[in-house]
Image (cartoon, coloured by chain):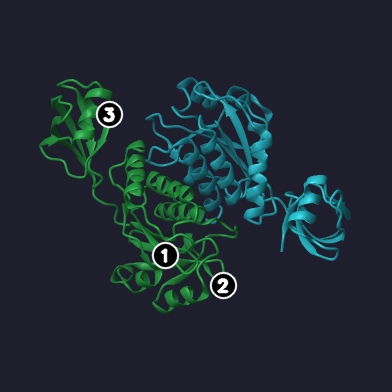
Chain colours: A cyan, B green
Amino acid sequence: MRFFYAPEVSPLHQLDADESKHMVRVLRANTGDEFEIVDGRGRRYKGVLKEANKRCCVLATTLLEEVPAPSAGLTLVIAPTKSTERFEWLLEKAMEYGAHRIQPIWTERSERKVSKDDRWNRILISALKQSKQLWLTELAPAMPWTDWVASENSQRSKGFVAHCEPTDKLHFFDEVPVGAPCWIGIGPEGDFTSVEIEMAQKAGFTPVSLGDQRLRTETAGLAAVQMHQLAQRR
Amino acid sequence: MRFFYAPEVSPLHQLDADESKHMVRVLRANTGDEFEIVDGRGRRYKGVLKEANKRCCVLATTLLEEVPAPSAGLTLVIAPTKSTERFEWLLEKAMEYGAHRIQPIWTERSERKVSKDDRWNRILISALKQSKQLWLTELAPAMPWTDWVASENSQRSKGFVAHCEPTDKLHFFDEVPVGAPCWIGIGPEGDFTSVEIEMAQKAGFTPVSLGDQRLRTETAGLAAVQMHQLAQRR
């Protein structure tokens, strides 16, 4: 069955012109055909095509399932990589794993400070549909690391800073809170500066390691998402 | 310091023509310059350039460190994806995480059955150097899944088969043996066929799940590598 995404689903749901054209021309859908619609906020609907019109299709929807947000969501606070491709790969994989939220940050050593919200959201939505999940990974507007550390949002849950400086650090996997939200900061190629790390420590956040390997930024990001999820199984 | 890879390192180590040219023309190295050499088999050497010759450089090497192979290595038995790019991405990431061995397999639903050993090994070596590790992820010659299941190698350690058929399955993370080698089979886009799964079960291997999400082949492969590593921390 075809799987659609729509951020808001009404009982008589109208598709926009692009989707309607796709429905009629590509899927060759007819009145009475059934579809599944997810809103990325935990709800899954059945949609029955009532009007097959290439400009405006109408689906009669009924709620099939509603899943609450996981109580222990991870916010991945990460510097987009210099290579767009590597960051986009991370977005796809983080959504496949079911990450809660991604907060892009600009740091002193960030080589690229351009956020592509529309494109990035399209990648997340495509991975949501491909992996048939009900909660869309949320993409927050990019902000400087200093602003994030000083923000109210960063204070709302336990926070961690992953870095590679040779100091004694706990392993993130051993420190993940179970059943409660948290966030982890991951620096760009070349890592956070020591000033950036110190600033976060002074604000009360915990420096952690992701293991002995020297991981690329995007690999570290994905490793953190999975550590967080597997720690919930303990 | 520059980081080199050479599968065999001798006390007076000669670089081949390509590496020698790179050493002299690109790195502009001079006699007396120091380098690090890893053999991908646990050994790290210091190398001092004795002869800077664009056809044949010679380095005097001394062993700095020797790390034994991890006792609990995972062999990732996986169907290469239709998109070469996605499989090559997996090779890079698996090496970054420090996977022990990758065994490509051809299955009934494999859409591509071409192995590119030279190219794939170059990707692994590049990731070895980038992540500064001492053990190179080993790439085994591709073989049909049926041959793998019937092989002596598959019987040498505990084996698992990840699949998405809706049957009761244990979670791989909960089943990973600690301190002992094991392998896990991961199917192509469209999964193993039920015949392929049954065949492995009859041979004594355990069906497992990697979680509730529907993961792409390469994402499932990487998830398994990390589950195996994190399970060793328990």
The residue that disc 1 covers is: B106
Q: Classify mark 1: helix, strand or loop.
A: strand
Give the CA separation, mark 2 to mark 1.
26 Å
Q: Is residue B90 visible?
A: yes
Q: Is residue B181 left or right of residue A112?
A: left
The chain that hosts pointer 3 is B
Residue A165 percent coordinates (x, y): 40, 29
The picture quadrant where one finds residue B140 is: bottom left
Quadrant in which the C terminus of chain B is drawn: bottom left
A170 or B22, nearer to the observer? B22
Q: Residue at point 15% right, 29% down? A: B57
Q: Is residue A19 left or right of residue A130?
A: right
The residue that disc 2 covers is: B168
The residue at the far left in this view is B12
Residue A183 percent coordinates (x, y): 59, 38
Residue B169 drawn above or below residue B226: below
Quadrant in which the N terminus of chain B is drawn: top left
Type of amino acid under label 3: Arg
Residues marked 2 and 1 touching at CB (< 8 Å): no
Say whether disc 3 or disc 1 marks the residue closer to the N-terminus.
Answer: 3
The residue that disc 3 covers is: B2
Type of amino acid under label 1: Trp
Q: Residues within 10 Å of mark 2 (few under 14, many from 20)?
A: few
Residue A30 percent coordinates (x, y): 82, 63
Q: Is residue A43 visible?
A: no
Type of amino acid under label 2: Asp
Residue B59 percent coordinates (x, y): 14, 31
Q: How many marks?
A: 3
Q: Comparing marks 2 and 3, which lies closer to the viewer?
A: 3
